[in-house]
Image (tube, helix red, strand yellow):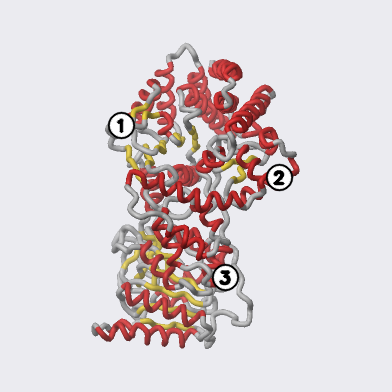
Amino acid sequence: MAVSSPTDLAALDYEREEEYLLRAISGLDVAFDSGDLGSFQDLQDHVEQFRPHVVHLTGHGAVGKKCPLCGRLSEPDEKVCRNCSASLEGVSALGHFAFEDESGKADMRSSEELRRLMAGSGVQCVFVSGCEIGKAPPTEALGGVCQGLVGEEVPLAIGWAASISDDVANQFARSFYHTLVAGRPIDRSLVQARQDVWKSCEKRGDPSWTLPVLYSATDQGQIFDLQKPPENPPRQKRPQLPLPGMTEGYAEQFIGRRREQQRLLAALQDGSLQTVIITGLGGSGKSSLATRLARTLEGYGFEPIPVPSSREKPLSSARLLQACRRVFRQAARKCEARGDTLKARVLKAAAQDLDNPDIPVNERLEDLVSTLNEGRFLLVLDNFESNMDEEKRSILNRDLVEFYEYLLANLTGGSKAIVTSRYLPAGKLPPKVKEETLGDLGEASFFKFMRRDDLVEKRLRSGELSHELLKEIRRRLGGTPRFLGQIRKVLRDISAEELKQQLDDIPKGIEKGELQKKQDKYCEDIFISRLYSYLTPESQRALSRAAVYDVAVNTEGLEAVTGKPTEELKGLVREWQDHAFAYPKTERATVELWTVYGLLRSWLLAQLDFEDCKATHERAGDFLNEVLLKNRGGDFGTSPAEVALELRSHYLQAQNYEKARNATDKISNIFM
């Protein structure tokens, strides 16, 4: 399924359209997948990977001539493009479907392009729903989208002969797919769906039941082999890895946030925005969205400079200068490799100035912004609330206050900045700085995420789990991405009766101020504790001890805190991954690293008694101290300063203040 609603065309609630179709196939033995961006490329990726029998397109369609220069669509009888005045002589009038480009604007694609996209993919039928889709074109045109689609590659298509109301369209789709899945031929399924909507149309004198049209280039009636046992088709599995040095931002499958991505990417690229501050409750996906934006901008030549914060490792001017210096030097080497020696010298000089103790810190931070203005970097300040007074929403570090204000006011050149924070720092924002607040994911995104697990979808297809039960989970526990991965793992095997009972035990009418705390508590009680119980006692204890790390570590680091041999740990970490407790990270590291989900760490550590927790922290500190002494920070894709800050945090939590003092000395020496 693909729903497109370009922002420069008549408004179409794409999330509601997705919800309608999800409800239409509820309870059917149907493997389902849906695009997330409404783009032509997104559809192509899903068709190639999923290889569906039916593709359902919802959106705007039109018949016209597409300008070969500017890509704008003109009327079928136009001789010259209205937009750029290019000649349209020799350009055929075709049916076009309006996809969305990266900024959300219309990207018109002809029926010929759609047919080529689906050639050889196994698609048997395209169900096209939207304004003007089935419109009969003038005789000189090749046809509307459906007429142009059907051929050897796509034998069947269904479209509307005119626009139609949402309720009729969705009732028709539900009846059509129910009949089709029951094994009836496509023409009989169409007749049955028409008859079903006729009953409601007749009451209000609506002729819409006559509008669905079947276009065919074949005499085949079935679109799938009834004798072939059903199987789950392959799905896209491209996890989003965190940026180097960050543990937040991982997404097993990034779903939703379409409009946020389009809005922010377009504004950052065209310069109407220089800095974006992404705010929202913990677990709302701020770091994941920031990482998504950074990964996309990286493809446009931006060099990310990720600088995360935490309560144990707040941001300081020294950390900030060091992170930027390191990336400036890397960029200089790239410039040298492509022969741009002048720019390489400028970047090297800037990196040296950031290190110069004779230059006051505030001046170096201002120089940092100047270098950003001259380059093409993306500064990402993650978890910025760790540096703030929560009540006053003021930044605690004076140098950081001055830098933050200077950055917002003076970042005006080629580089951009993204800040993630639970709440907006106090103060007025300059014109080219925008706050983007994240709320819950839409209902359709919630369902799409759940259905992208083969076992969960199998249970939905068989009726073991119902659409309404999943809807109740979202209603009771919220739609933030916070614990969705863990919820999905539990939905693989929990009985519907048990789940319903546990949801019924959640009291209604929770005060808004307490809502997230309560929802988190119920998620932990219902889902996290259940996943934890699936592990053996030995695996549970090892996982809780591994949760002391706030950085990605290798099996050697896990061995240091768990006492388990490396060979046994290799099996354990895969088990933790299977139960959505940890994920692998290999980018910019020389070995495979593992990270426990940050949102689960507090709960996991709470399963240890006080003395065990202290001892585990000390063992983690000792391991990292050894890493620092042997200068092995590069094995973990991080700097000596970050290793030293992490080991100091462990010694403080172990209450070994002598080792913590030694770690502080190491940090001072590094920064000096």
> With 599 as the anchor, is 209 left or right in this view?
left
Instruction: Please rate how many residues cluster around mark 2, counting C-alpha atoms within 10 Å: few if below 14, some from 14 to 19, many from 20.
Output: few
Q: Nearer the viewer, mark 2 or mark 1?
A: 2
Mark 2 touches mark 1? (CB < 8 Å): no
| Quadrant location of the C terminus in the rendered image | top right
Quarter of the rendering containing residue 131: bottom left
Instruction: Please rate how many residues cluster around mark 3, counting C-alpha atoms within 10 Å: few if below 14, some from 14 to 19, many from 20.
Output: some
Q: Give, as a three-letter code, the residue at label 1.
A: Ala
Mark 2 or mark 1, which has the lower sequence index? 1
Q: Give, as a three-letter code, the residue at label 2.
A: Lys
Taking the view exactly as shown, the residue that stands out farthest to the top is 358
Q: Nearer the viewer, mark 3 or mark 2?
A: 2
The residue to which callout 3 is attached is: 121
As drawn, 209 above or below 557: below
Quarter of the rendering containing residue 275: top left
As drawn, 657 above or below 262: above
Seen at 58% across and 30% down, the residue is: 333
The residue to which callout 2 is attached is: 570
Q: Give, as a three-letter code, the residue at label 3.
A: Ser
Of 219 and 92, nearer the camera is: 219
> With 47 as the anchor, is 10 left or right in this view?
left
The residue to which callout 1 is attached is: 426
Q: Is residue 590 visible?
A: no
Of 509 and 150, nearer the camera is: 509
Seen at 49% across and 13% down, the residue is: 357
- Report, in whole angstroms, how far the alpha carbon at label 3 lies from the one at label 1: 54 Å
Instruction: Label 3, secondary structure: give it.
Output: loop
As drawn, 151 above or below 602: below
Quarter of the rendering containing residue 626: top right
Mark 3 or mark 2, which has the lower sequence index? 3
